[in-house]
């Protein structure tokens, strides 16, 4: 199973590195990205810290390193007597960076969804490791707009539709946190089936 983690990117970690595949940085705002450029092939998390008065916050905030946290929860090396065990120990993670200082933009996230699933994003190289699951542990307020929906539809159209697998309803929805583990375990226990595409979208206020 290949899980695209659409989040803040990735940092090197000895309990995770062997399960991380090449990703992409979809953050188009170079200032927010802190890597001196817009989109590029390096999904390194540069930190999303902010000073007091920035990002609509009165007090300063430290970097979350949220993408690495999520990637580790999914695919930390298991059985090595080090750190933690991933809930999907046979999974590989494709880190896709969309969140940086003060959050992320809808257009970056939408393109990242399409790219992660193996779809075409004009002017960008194809993803060599299309996701069988996409994890988006990020939130927002308001309705699911047409840009998001189009991206989700593109991704879901590349998912498995038959053979007993379950197709997620294509749209913005919320999955209770505990269910991700159940879904990953189901994928591991049924290797004869083509994994279904899972979009875990947490788009709620
Ligand atoms: Ca960049
Ligand atoms: Ca470990």
Image: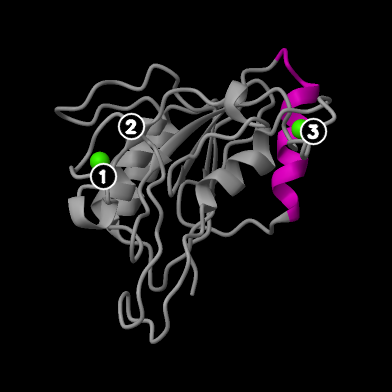
Residue 57 occupies which quadrant of the picture?
A: bottom left
Q: Which residues are magenta?
A: 178-192
Of badges 2 and 1, the one in the foreground is: 1
Whether the residue under disc 3 has CB within 8 Å of ligand 2: yes
* Residue 30 left/right relative to 144: left
Q: Which residue is mark 3?
A: 82
39 is higher (above) or lower (below) than 64: above
**16 inside magenta stretch:** no
Q: Residue at x 34, y 40 (%)?
A: 112
Q: Residue at x 65, y 20 (%)?
A: 163
The answer to whether the residue labelled 2 contacts the one labelled 1, judged by CB atoms less than 8 Å apart, is: yes
Whether the residue under disc 2 has CB within 8 Å of ligand 1: yes
* Residue 130 left/right relative to 181: left
* Place of residue 126 in the rendered image (x, y in percent of width and height, measured from the top left): 29, 21
Q: Which residue is mark 1?
A: 35
Q: Which of the two labelled residues, at mark 3 and mark 1, occupies the earlier sequence position?
A: 1
- From this viewpoint, is residue 47 visible? yes
Of badges 2 and 3, the one in the foreground is: 3
Q: Residue at x 24, y 33 (%)?
A: 40
Q: Which residue is mark 2?
A: 42
Local packing at callout 1 (Cα closer than 10 Å; few below 14, some 14-19, many 20+) is: some
Local packing at callout 2 (Cα closer than 10 Å; few below 14, some 14-19, many 20+) is: some
Q: CA distance from mark 2 to mark 3?
A: 27 Å
Whether the residue under disc 1 has CB within 8 Å of ligand 1: yes
Front-most of residues 11 and 127:
11
Res. 155 mark: none
Q: Which of the two labelled residues, at mark 2 and mark 1, occupies the earlier sequence position?
A: 1
């Amino acid at each position: 199973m290949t899980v695209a983690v659409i989040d803040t990117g990735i940092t090197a970690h000895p309990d995770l590195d062997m399960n991380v595949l090449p990703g992409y940085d979809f953050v188009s705002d170079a200032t927010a990205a802190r890597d001196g450029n817009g989109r590029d092939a390096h999904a390194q998390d540069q930190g999303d810290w902010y000073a007091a008065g920035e990002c609509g916050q009165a007090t300063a905030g430290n970097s979350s390193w949220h993408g690495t946290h999520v990637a580790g929860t999914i695919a930390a090396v298991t059985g090595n007597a080090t750190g933690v065990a991933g809930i999907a120990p046979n999974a590989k993670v494709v880190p896709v960076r969309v969140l940086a200082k003060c959050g992320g933009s809808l257009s970056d996230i939408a393109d990242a969804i399409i790219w992660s699933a193996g779809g075409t994003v004009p002017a960008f190289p194809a993803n060599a490791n299309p996701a069988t699951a996409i994890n988006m542990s990020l939130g927002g307020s308001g309705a699911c707009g047409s840009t998001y929906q189009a991206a989700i539809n593109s991704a879901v159209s590349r998912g498995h539709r038959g053979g007993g697998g379950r197709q997620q309803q294509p749209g913005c929805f919320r999955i209770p946190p505990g269910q991700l583990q159940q879904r990953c375990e189901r994928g591991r226990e049924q290797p004869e089936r083509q994994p279904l595409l899972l979009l875990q979208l947490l788009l709620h206020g």
